Image (tube, coloured by chain):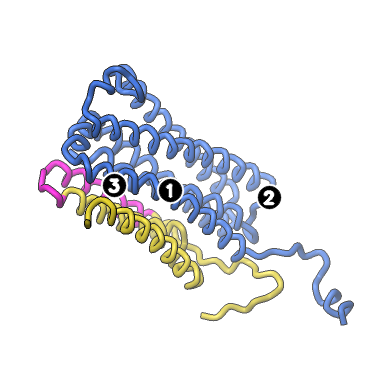
Amino acid sequence: MSKPHDSHTEEKSHTVSYGNLVLIWLGLLALTGITVALSGFSIGRWVIITALTIASVKSLLVMNVFMHLRFEDRMFRVFVSVALLTLAIFLTLTFFDYAFY
Amino acid sequence: MNAQVQAAVPVHEHHRDDVGTKIGMWLFLFTELILFGGLFIVYAVYRFKHPAEFQLAAKELDTFVGTANTIILLTSSLTVAMSITSIQEGRKRLSMLLVALTILLALAFLVNKYFEWSHKFSLGLYPQSPELLNKPQGEILYFGLYYVMTGLHALHVIIGMIVLAFMVVFIARGTINQRSFVKLEAGGLYWHLVDIIWIFLFPLFYLLH
């Protein structure tokens, strides 16, 4: 998927159909329902793990479809991964001071 | 040589680099990610140190209001995404209507937030309140983070509404049109970021009990 690089790279955007957008929205609402329902059961540390997993899935749906990341050049996904990895490193290094000593 | 190159580029064509614009917007979003990310790390550390007190304090929050606001923001993300599809199809009025609807949903979110905070204030749960200072350290930290993080998020909602209002004007004036809509895409990206931050704030503050 190489792109021609003119002096002015015009929009050659992918159009996401209304149907697909609504489908993603329904998926997001369903996941919200699931995470609220699951919070009712106290299952120790699993509460936070399931809640964060569902939140991550929701974010991926928003980023890939609503934010068009799926349809952009691969470079965008690499950039986003680097940013998220940086945050993960910050979080891990911080916890070296509190949890894993 | 130079004159030849000059001649090859039509003078009336305004220089555009839509990919560059979007990269710029994403880079800005990364700075936002680090801004909120720092707060999420503070939250993670304090929660790790005071797990029981965080769970107790979280019971004070109204899951119903939180869920309602989550649904409102998810829907507003849908409408702004649809506005891009409609401008791509050249449906100008529909696109404007969808962005306007997004602004209304943002307003609904803030109204909910206002009532939610007012209720907390009336219970004496606000930073430095005597009620709160009598509570254990973990609960004070929880409410401090609650006000800072949802407050900073609400500030982003307000900025997002202003950005989206500009988008409506740009579409009306034809600055954003079927052939050139990267501004609307950038505005949309900002709005989706606000949504994603809330996707994480919601379970961390409301669904802990």
- The quarter holding residue B135 reads top left
Amino acid carrying label 2: it is: Gly
- Most foreground residue, B29 or B74: B29
Between A78 and B192, the one lying in front of the other is: A78
Specify the amino acid type for callout 1. Answer: Ser
For label 1, the SS is helix
The residue that disc 1 covers is B77
Chain letter, blue: B
The answer to whether the residues at label 3 and label 1 have Cβ atoms under 8 Å apart is no
Q: Residues within 10 Å of mark 1 (few under 14, many from 20)?
A: many
Q: Is residue B142 above or below residue B130?
A: below
**Amino acid marked by disc 3:** Ala
Query: What residue do we see at 83% from left, 78% from top?
Result: B5
Q: Element at badge 3?
A: helix
Viewer-nearest of discs 1 and 2: 1
The location of residue A21, given as percent across then percent down, is: 40, 56
Residue B45, how many percent across, how many down? 28, 46
Query: Residue B208: x percent and y percent?
Result: 20, 41
Q: Badge 3, how many Cα within 10 Å: few under 14, some, many 20+?
A: some
Residue A27 falls inside the magenta stretch: yes
* Chain at numbered mark 1: B
State whether residue B136 appears in this view. yes
Check the residue under mark 2 and report the chain it is in: B
Look at the image and give the colour of chain A. yellow
Q: Are marks 2 and 3 on the same chain?
A: yes
Which comes before the other along the chain, label 3 or label 1? Answer: 3
Whether marks 3 and 1 lie on the same chain: yes
In the image, the segment drawn in magenta is A22-46
Q: Quadrant of the N terminus of chain B?
A: bottom right
Residue drawn at x 34%, y 48% as measured from the top left: B41
Q: Residue at horizontal 56%, vertical 59%? A: B88
Q: Position of residue A79 (x, y in %)?
A: 47, 66
